[in-house]
Structures are given as structure tokens and as C-alpha cells.
Image (cartoon, rainbow, N blue to C red):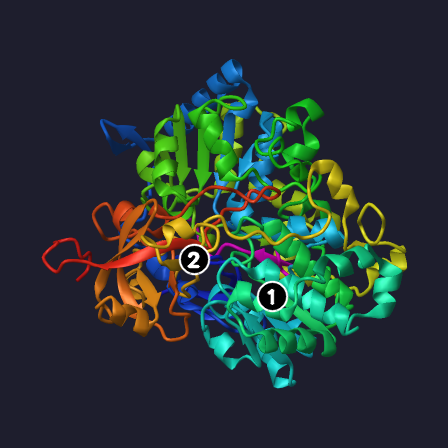
């Protein structure tokens, strides 16, 4: 009879990290269901989490270390693979300095504390992650304004929820949707700012269907309406903010009528939505991790949203936007105790790629944006980067301007990759290492977990030859004679939990810990964590860094307004990157049960626009930008302005040269970057759509 056990843990197939109960039979994963006792997800499980057994035992999973051999890959031992990596890293450090080695991870993969600690011991300040296009601008903009990140809306207790470029039903369902449903059941108003008619947008009391890239103008208009009509929280503004009069003068010109012309939205609806947000306190504001972080003015947008929350008195109050420090404090996922920039000698820390170009990163550190690493590889500026290691990072498909990303990696002296499956990025690697799945490893999770910490106990031993990434780093540190690094995984996890006064062995029995929400901490402390101790409506201290003290609307660099010369060839506005529930960015594309739900890249296009081009619903077309073209299936979508089209991202699998033919980032741009955060401008571009000839032979899955 099979030995069966149930293991409670948390899923890591996406950001939400829902509670799950795994069924293990004779050491094999056979079932996954939601954990009803989990305090946040409450039994929810999405298709990705349910597909965990399919992922673990997929016949394409990499289960042996691989080395490049005559253009292909051959299996090798762990000892040999790690020796090759260690030799390349040692040689690069000796010849070009430790900073010539960069380690990178994909979005929210849990590896940040361990990679950062490893880099600190090795001596490199260069941890690369896509934070500049996912969350980083929110942290930088809101921290520069009020001293903490605007990432924890208290939807459940709100009288008004405003989702700004945020569709949590697809991107964070287990983390946010229970609270949103609770808030709606209690009668909360719902405001959605989104060019697309998502399900939540169509349920909203106010759906503001703005032109992509005009968010800052709308936010400034909200402030104008709120201030002109004296709907702001006078007590909070008077006692806890700086620069209100400067803000009042700054936004005065952004009337609903002027803003309507910029945003393509009705002035009356803008006025009513602004008033609804201000008059229904407590109100929570949910910024999209990608939606507000992928623009040339991402910093100004997140500053604007934080100011909106501040002047309406919705910071650190129940039902507003909370400050949720993790109970692990400086040992949290992006905690100061791990960060090389904060722990290396100052001269070495200042070599961190991006700090010279984006000086605010020297005060509010986020990982080096990938786009600051590329010149160091291509042109050896400001110094050479020779070795890159990627952990769960399919850069070629996940980052904009895929052609350039691929060309950059081809110029590297050495690339190693850690991933479950082959991708267009692992194809460029010299060594590939096979990681353990989240069901096969122990960990703790605290990032964006609403002041909770969760244990992630492993349910079974890894498939032979697959290895916990933390163990990879321990073994690599041994090869490099890094005596200051951890000696075993338990020691690593105990170190993370030390501020809580517990060990991992004790904590995994408890499963999770919640510190409780703390409201209006600024009253107890007598200040906010800003240079003046108050919320910086006008952040005058930013002037010294060459940054505007007040948020400024900048027209997208590629739009019908800024580039009228392009409208003849590229008459449509393209916005990209809306999430699909069944996928996590570019991963999961080879999982049969998931691929059945979303087999092809689709272009959401208004039926009138499509018919005007003689394009049928479901027809394969060319989507063309000034940078090239991709093949995509047109899908009629009525809840979209006829002048706007939208494409999801991450498609590449199952098509020959798929990274080139069906990957939307072949036609996106990686310049110009947001001058403060390094964010990429992929939410507002210009394009055209052309019919694909039926005899072209290039319809991928027709």
C-alpha cells in the first residue's frame, strides 16, 4: 500500500504564494489543493498551482547539469559544472574586479536575499532584477514621498478601492482578491483606471479608460479636483505634509477639461471619480506592479499616487494604504542585511551599475536595472562585465527589445543559467544548472505578505540531480573559498528568522507568523521617514539630485502626440503586458493543461478597427512597430478604444524561432528609460496591424 501524507506549504508558481496542501504518495507529488486555513488565500488555488505535479514530472524538465558542447549541451557532474563556474568567476574577479560578475533573478523568485548575501561575500555590488519594470518605481516613488512603499492596500476595510493599472484578478488573485471581494460586499465603491475593460473594470462604479501613458496627467487632475473643491484632509495636510501650496499651484492647470483632451476620457467622469475617491474615506489605492512601473514617467506616477493617498488622509489607516514591514525586518527578502550596496566598502558599493545614471538608487536601493548592465557588456562602460548568472530569468523574452538582449548575451565571456526548462535564454548559456521545484525545497517568504512570514516546508526530496538554489550557492561558495558564506540551508533560514527569535525547524511547525497591522505609526514616532519628517508633497530635497520636486506629466516618447510623424505608418497605440492567469510571465508555456487555456499570443483589437482592416476574429496577423514585426492572432475585444490595441507578453514556446516570431518584446523598446527609476516605456508604443497572407506558411498554430 502506498505511503500517503499531506504537507501544508505555500505555492510559488506566481507572486501570490497561496497556501496549499500537497498530497505525497511514496515520495511523489500526486495532488494539490488550496489550504483553507491560510490567512490570506483562504483555500484559493489557480490553474498554475494545480498544475504543480505536471511541472515537476514534465518530460522536458532539466534534471542534470549541462555544459555547452559543439553548439549543443551535454550532461556533466555537479562538481564539474560548479568548478567551471567558479573558475570563470575567479578569473573575472582577478582580471577585472568582483564587479565584473553579475547575478540576476526573475521577478519575485525568492532568491534575492541569498544572491545578495553571496554577492556581498564575493565582493560584487551587482544584483540584476526586473524591479525597474515591476515594483521598483513604486518603492522609489512612494518611499521618496512618505518613507514606505505604497504596496499594501487594505481593500477589505475600504469604503472606496481604486485599482490603478492593476488587474489583481489575473496577476495577484490569491493575495488580493479575497480582500477585494470582502470590501465590495461591504458596499465599497470601485474605481478602475485601465485602457482595457477587464472584468473588474466593467464591475466598477467608475472605469476610466484612459489613453495608455497618460496616467500622470490623470493623477494630477485628481489632485486639482480634490484641492479646488476642498475635499482633502485638512488636518493631515496641515500637520503632516510639506509643500501643499506648491502642489496646489502645480496642479491648478490640470482641469478635467484639459486632462480629458490628453487622456481621451470624459471630463465629467474624471471629476466624479476624483470626488468619489476623496469623499469615501477610508479609501485604498492599488497600483499595478507592471501597470504603473513601465513608463518614461514611472517615478512621477508613483509619487502622484502616493500624494493622492496622503492629501486624502489614507496613509497608514485601516481601509487605506498600510505600512507593512515584514517581521523579519533587515533580514527580509530585500532587507538591508543582505544588500551588497549597504554592506560592501563604500568605494566598491558605488560601482553598482545604475547608481551613476539613477542617483536616487543610492538612497533607495533597488536591484540594478538590466538596461544598465547591457552597456557594461557591450561597451565595457562604466567597466567590463564578463560573467552573468541567471536564476529563473528568461531575459530574452521577458525584457524589452529582445534582439538587443540576445546580442548582449552573445557578447558575454560566460553565462550560466538556473532553470527548470530550456528557454531562449538558456540556449545562450555555457552552463545550465537544474533547480529543485518549490515542492522540493525549504524556504521562508515575507515579500509583500502583509506583515506575515510564511514557512515553505519541502514536501519531498528533489528529483535526483536537481538541487535547491541555496545549496548551489553554498557549494559554489565552497569552490570559491568564500569562508564567510553559509554552511547549510538550515543556517541560511535560521539567519532569515533570527529577528523573530525562532529557528526554521521551530517555525515550520508554526507555519506562519503575523505581526499585526500598526496604524498611524508616524504619530507615535512624531515623523515620517523622510528628510523633513513629513510627507513630501513637494520633495525639495530631490532638486539636489536633478529631479523635479513635484510630479511632472511627460507625454510618452512614442505616441500620436509626441511623434505625429509616425502616425501614417503606425496609427494605433500599442500597450503590452496584461497578465494571463494561467502563466507567470514567460514560464509555464510548455505545460499542456495551461497551454490549452491560452495556446496563442492574442492581439486585443476593437471589432470596428479590425473590420476596417478586413481582419476576422481569430485571424493571424502581423503586428508591426518601428522596431519590427511579430505574428499574433487577432481577437475582437469591444472594451478597448478603437485607437488602442493590447498584447499579452511571454509567448515563445512551441514555435520554431518563437522568441523571434511570436514574442511581443521583439517589437517593444528599452529606451528612453524613466530618468529616475530606469523604468522601460512598454505601456505606450505605436504600431500597425496587417493581414498575414494565408499562403505565407508562417501562421504558427493555424
Q: Circle 2 sits on which residue?
A: 577
Q: Is residue 40 visible?
A: no
Q: Secondary structure at mark 1?
A: helix
Q: Is residue 453 magenta?
A: yes
How packed is label 1: few (under 14 Cα within 10 Å), some, or many (20 or more)? few
Q: Position of residue 537 (x, y in %)?
A: 77, 55
Q: Position of residue 559 (x, y in %)?
A: 45, 54
**Along the line of sight, which residue is nearer the eye, 697 or 349?**
697
Quadrant in which residue 348 is drawn: top right
Q: Position of residue 292 (x, y in %)?
A: 56, 57
**Along the line of sight, which residue is nearer the eye, 530 or 514?**
530
Q: Main secondary structure of the magenta part?
A: loop
Q: Quadrant of the C terminus?
A: bottom left
- Mark seen at residue 258: 1
Q: Position of residue 622 (x, y in %)?
A: 25, 56
Mark 2 or mark 1: which comes first in sequence?
1
> Residues in magenta?
447-462
Q: Please name the residue shown 12% across and 54% down the image.
A: 696
Amino acid at each position: 500500500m502506498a505511503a500517503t501524507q499531506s504537507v501544508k506549504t505555500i505555492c510559488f508558481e506566481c507572486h501570490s504564494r497561496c497556501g496549499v496542501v500537497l498530497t505525497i504518495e511514496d515520495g511523489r507529488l500526486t495532488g494539490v489543493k488550496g489550504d483553507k486555513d491560510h490567512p490570506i488565500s483562504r483555500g484559493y488555488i489557480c490553474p498554475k498551482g494545480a498544475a504543480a505535479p505536471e511541472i515537476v514530472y514534465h518530460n522536458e524538465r532539466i534534471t542534470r547539469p549541462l555544459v555547452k558542447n559543439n553548439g549543443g549541451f551535454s550532461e556533466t557532474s555537479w562538481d564539474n559544472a560548479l568548478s567551471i563556474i567558479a573558475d570563470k568567476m575567479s578569473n573575472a574577479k582577478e582580471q577585472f574586479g568582483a564587479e565584473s560578475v553579475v547575478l540576476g533573478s526573475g521577478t519575485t523568485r525568492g532568491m534575492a536575499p541569498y544572491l545578495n548575501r553571496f554577492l556581498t561575500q564575493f565582493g560584487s555590488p551587482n544584483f540584476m532584477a526586473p524591479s525597474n519594470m515591476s515594483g521598483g518605481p513604486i518603492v522609489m516613488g512612494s518611499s521618496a514621498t512618505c518613507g514606505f512603499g505604497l504596496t499594501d492596500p487594505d481593500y477589505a476595510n475600504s469604503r472606496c478601492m481604486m485599482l490603478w493599472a492593476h488587474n489583481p484578478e489575473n496577476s495577484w488573485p490569491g493575495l488580493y482578491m479575497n480582500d477585494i471581494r470582502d470590501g465590495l460586499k461591504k458596499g465599497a465603491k470601485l474605481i478602475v483606471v485601465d485602457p482595457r475593460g477587464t472584468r473588474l473594470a466593467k464591475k466598477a462604479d467608475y472605469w476610466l479608460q484612459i489613453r495608455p501613458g497618460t496616467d500622470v496627467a490623470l493623477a494630477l487632475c485628481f489632485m486639482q479636483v480634490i484641492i479646488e473643491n476642498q475635499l482633502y484632509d485638512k488636518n493631515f495636510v496641515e500637520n503632516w505634509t510639506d509643500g501643499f501650496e506648491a502642489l496646489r499651484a502645480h496642479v491648478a492647470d490640470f482641469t478635467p477639461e484639459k486632462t480629458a483632451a490628453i487622456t481621451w476620457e470624459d471630463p465629467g467622469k474624471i471629476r466624479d471619480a476624483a470626488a468619489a475617491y476623496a469623499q469615501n474615506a477610508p479609501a485604498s489605492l492599488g497600483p499595478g506592479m507592471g501597470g504603473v512601473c513601465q513608463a518614461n514617467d514611472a517615478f512621477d506616477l508613483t509619487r502622484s499616487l502616493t500624494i493622492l493617498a496622503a492629501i486624502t488622509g489614507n496613509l497608514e489607516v485601516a481601509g487605506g494604504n498600510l505600512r507593512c514591514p515584514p517581521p523579519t525586518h533587515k533580514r527580509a527578502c530585500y532587507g538591508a542585511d543582505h544588500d551588497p550596496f549597504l554592506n560592501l566598502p563604500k568605494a566598491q558599493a558605488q560601482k553598482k551599475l545604475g547608481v551613476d545614471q539613477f542617483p536616487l538608487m543610492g538612497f533607495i536601493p533597488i536591484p540594478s536595472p538590466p538596461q544598465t548592465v547591457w552597456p557594461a557588456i557591450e561597451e565595457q562602460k562604466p567597466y567590463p562585465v564578463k560573467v552573468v548568472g541567471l536564476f529563473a530569468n528568461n531575459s530574452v523574452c521577458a525584457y524589452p527589445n529582445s534582439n538587443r538582449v540576445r546580442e548582449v548575451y552573445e557578447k558575454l565571456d560566460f553565462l550560466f543559467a538556473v532553470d527548470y526548462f530550456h528557454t531562449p535564454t538558456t540556449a545562450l548559456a555555457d552552463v545550465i544548472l537544474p533547480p529543485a521545484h518549490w515542492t522540493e525545497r525549504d524556504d521562508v517568504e515575507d515579500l509583500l505578505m502583509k506583515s506575515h512570514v510564511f514557512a515553505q516546508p519541502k514536501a519531498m526530496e528533489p528529483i535526483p540531480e536537481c538541487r535547491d538554489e541555496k545549496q548551489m550557492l553554498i557549494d559554489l561558495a565552497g569552490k570559491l573559498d568564500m569562508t564567510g558564506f553559509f554552511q547549510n540551508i538550515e543556517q541560511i533560514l535560521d539567519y532569515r528568522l533570527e529577528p523573530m527569535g525562532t529557528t526554521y525547524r521551530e517555525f515550520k511547525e508554526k507555519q506562519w507568523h503575523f505581526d499585526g497591522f500598526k496604524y498611524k505609526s508616524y504619530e507615535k514616532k512624531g515623523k515620517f521617514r523622510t528628510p523633513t519628517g513629513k510627507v513630501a508633497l513637494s520633495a525639495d530635497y530631490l532638486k539636489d539630485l536633478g529631479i523635479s520636486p513635484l510630479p511632472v506629466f511627460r507625454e510618452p516618447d512614442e505616441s500620436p502626440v509626441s511623434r505625429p510623424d509616425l502616425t501614417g505608418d503606425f496609427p494605433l497605440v500599442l500597450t503590452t503586458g496584461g497578465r494571463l492567469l494561467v502563466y507567470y510571465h514567460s514560464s509555464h508555456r510548455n505545460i499542456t493543461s495551461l497551454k490549452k487555456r491560452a495556446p496563442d499570443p492574442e492581439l486585443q483589437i476593437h471589432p470596428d478597427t479590425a473590420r476596417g482592416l478586413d481582419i476576422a476574429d481569430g485571424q493571424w496577423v502581423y503586428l508591426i512597430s518601428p522596431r519590427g514585426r511579430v505574428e499574433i492572432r487577432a481577437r475582437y475585444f469591444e472594451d478597448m478604444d478603437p485607437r488602442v490595441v493590447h498584447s499579452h507578453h511571454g509567448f515563445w514556446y512551441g514555435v520554431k524561432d518563437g522568441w523571434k516570431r511570436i514574442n511581443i518584446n521583439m517589437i517593444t523598446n528599452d529606451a528612453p528609460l524613466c530618468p529616475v527609476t530606469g523604468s522601460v516605456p512598454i505601456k505606450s508604443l505605436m504600431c500597425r496591424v496587417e493581414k498575414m497572407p494565408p499562403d505565407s506558411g508562417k501562421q504558427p498554430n493555424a
